[in-house]
């Protein structure tokens, strides 16, 4: 199985390659990708240099152009595809029909991966993208169990990629409106969930209050672990009870189901976190490189939970939908 | 275990750094940043509009803080008291060894934030821009000291080695504090 690793900057791309990534995914410095945060991402020149570095080390670079083109501005998304092709990218990761169509028609030699943002989880949906745009790989939404992935793989004739570590979205991928409702910007169109210019942290007698566009989304004591300031991971009071209504702040860690994913026919394993730094990428990629190599050799991925506990959101980890323990 | 070791700080830092704080540290760091900007002008590009923001950097285990404007060749660093926050737009606080770990890229800012070791306030977008700019810069001690060649490598090895050793001690205290 290939190990697909995140990079928000050129330095992180190099760190991921050195740490053992088979491929690195990254995006341009604009809203064409779903991690459009200040100071993050690549210029065209940086991408070209990053591709050269990766290829010199026998690794690949995948370019995420995975947001949905805004009406009247589709040229920006087309330009991103053109520039990724010119830079020698090994694949483009996209979800928008207009972006996929442009890539398939204008760059027939460019490999296309269907982004998780497209939320393709049925054989019919996958076959549509394969037939219409010659998609070569589908990044699976984080709602399927290992058994469901195995069943899906038996019914399709295209590679699949599964997330194994990092942030989780509880909503149907690509269709969340929480950030947009509060701030006017969404991961789907603007490439940014909980845009930082709308996020504030304020200390008071009760601890720290995290606010998004004026909404208090969580309040925690000094020693309490926390997560990202997104509405889906906020604590709210309903029915007289205060709890994480949508989703706990917790990181996905599928280290324990790598053998199951291999048996289910998954081609590639994806680590989330283009917004994270070199230290995260280095540690997580190294741990998963060892784990994947161990599983490929017939062993198991022992101790990966312990190794990565310190990198996890809220200090906690879950196998999420892969095991669906709530059923 | 002393309380101060449970938050990733070391008593050694408190003993050592107040003496350094008495030196013209702000002047030296201002010169180092401006010299760095002359040598590597692209280093500050990722800050974008936030390069003119005033960052209040508060090492919680030291008796003083820093006001930093990371504006290329116009950069400014001042050593200030803990209460001199009025001109700051951004606040970053944490034990000095952890803050230095962010500077040299050996620690992950989000992980320290999740564990509440590092706190932020003010303009969150400027914090992110600074974090990403620093992370991509791959700064070494020699860069800040303006040293090159063998001398630079010697400084990097000595300083980074000492920081790694001190951080191991601090992190051991932190892990024990979290388990207790």
Image (cartoon, coloured by chain):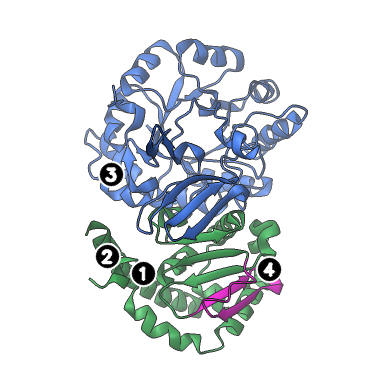
Q: Is residue B98 above or below residue A325?
A: below
- Tag 2 residue: B172
Q: Is residue A270 visible?
A: no
Q: Residue at x 45, y 46 (%)?
A: A218
Residue at the extreme right:
A72
Q: Are marks 1 and 2 in contact (CB under 8 Å)?
A: no
Distance from Cα at disc 4 to Cα at disc 3: 41 Å
The foreground one among B28 and B11 is B11
- Point out the stretch of residues depicted in magenta: B64-88
Q: The C terminus of chain A lies in which quarter of the figure? A: top left
- Are labels 1 and 3 on one chain? no
Q: Residue at x 54, y 23 (%)?
A: A118
**Rounded to the nearest whole Å, what is the CA distance between mark 1 and mark 2?**
12 Å
Q: Is residue A126 visible?
A: yes
Disc 1 secondary structure class: helix
Asked whether, in this view, residue A82 is left or right of residue A324, the answer is right
Q: Which residue is mark 4?
A: B71
Residue sitting at 60 percent across and 45 percent down? A213
Instruction: Give the camera-side residue of B109 and A98.
Output: B109
Is the residue A188 above or below the residue B1 in the image? Answer: above
**Circles 3 and 2 on the same subunit:** no
Q: Residue at x 38, y 72 (%)?
A: B163
What percent of the width, then of the height, locates residue A261? 32, 27
Q: Is residue B77 magenta?
A: yes
Which hue is chain B drawn in? Answer: green
Give the crowd class for mark 4: few <14, some 14-19, many >=20 residues within 10 Å: many
Image colour assigned to chain A: blue
Q: Which residue is mark 1?
A: B164
Q: Chain of mark 4?
A: B
Q: Earlier in the sequence, mark 1 or mark 2?
A: 1
Q: Earlier in the sequence, mark 4 or mark 1?
A: 4
């Amino acid at each position: 199985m290939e190990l697909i690793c995140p990079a928000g900057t050129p330095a992180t791309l190099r760190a991921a390659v050195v740490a053992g990534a088979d491929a690195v995914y990254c995006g341009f410095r604009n809203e064409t990708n779903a991690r459009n945060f200040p100071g993050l991402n690549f210029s065209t020149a940086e991408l070209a240099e990053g591709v050269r570095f990766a290829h010199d080390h026998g690794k690949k670079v995948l370019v995420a152009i995975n947001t949905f083109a805004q009406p009247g501005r589709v040229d920006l998304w087309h330009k991103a595809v053109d520039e990724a092709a010119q830079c020698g990218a090994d694949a483009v990761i996209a979800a928008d029909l207009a972006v996929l169509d442009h890539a398939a028609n204008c760059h027939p030699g460019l490999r296309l991966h269907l982004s998780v943002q497209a939320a393709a989880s049925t054989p019919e949906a996958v076959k549509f993208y394969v037939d219409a745009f010659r998609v070569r790989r589908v990044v699976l939404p984080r709602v399927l169990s290992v058994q469901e992935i195995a069943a899906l793989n038996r019914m399709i004739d295209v590679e699949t990629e599964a997330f194994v570590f990092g942030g989780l979205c509880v909503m149907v991928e690509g269709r969340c409106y929480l950030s947009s409702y509060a701030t006017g910007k969404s991961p789907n169109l603007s490439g940014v969930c909980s845009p930082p210019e709308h996020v504030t942290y304020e200390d008071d007698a009760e601890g720290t209050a995290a606010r998004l566009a004026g909404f208090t989304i969580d309040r925690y004591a000094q020693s309490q672990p926390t997560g990202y300031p997104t509405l889906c991971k906020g604590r709210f009071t309903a029915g007289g009870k205060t709890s994480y209504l949508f989703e706990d702040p917790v990181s996905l860690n599928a280290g324990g189901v790598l053998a199951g994913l291999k048996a289910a026919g998954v081609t590639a394993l994806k680590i989330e976190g283009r917004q994270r730094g070199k230290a995260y990428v280095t540690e997580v990629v190294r741990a998963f490189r060892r784990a994947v190599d161990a599983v490929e050799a017939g062993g198991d991925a022992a101790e990966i939970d312990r190794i990565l506990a310190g990198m996890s959101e809220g200090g906690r980890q879950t196998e999420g939908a892969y095991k669906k323990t709530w059923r | 275990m002393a309380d101060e070791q449970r938050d990733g700080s070391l008593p050694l830092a408190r003993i050592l750094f107040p003496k350094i704080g008495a030196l013209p540290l702000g002047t030296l760091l201002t010169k180092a940043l401006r010299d760095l900007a002359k040598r590597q002008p692209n280093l500050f590009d990722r800050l974008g509009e936030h390069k003119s923001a005033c960052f209040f950097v508060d090492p919680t285990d030291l008796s003083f803080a820093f006001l930093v404007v990371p504006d290329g060749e116009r950069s400014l660093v001042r050593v200030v008291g803990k209460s001199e926050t009025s001109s700051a737009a951004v606040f970053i606080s944490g034990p000095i060894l952890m803050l230095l770990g962010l500077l040299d890229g050996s620690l992950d800012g989000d992980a320290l934030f999740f564990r509440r070791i590092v706190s932020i306030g003010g303009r969150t977008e400027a914090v992110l821009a600074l974090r990403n700019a620093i992370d991509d810069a791959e700064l070494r001690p020699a860069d800040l000291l303006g040293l090159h060649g063998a001398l630079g490598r010697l400084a990097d090895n000595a300083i980074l080695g000492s920081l790694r050793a001190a951080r191991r001690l601090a992190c051991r205290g932190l892990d024990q504090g979290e388990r207790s």
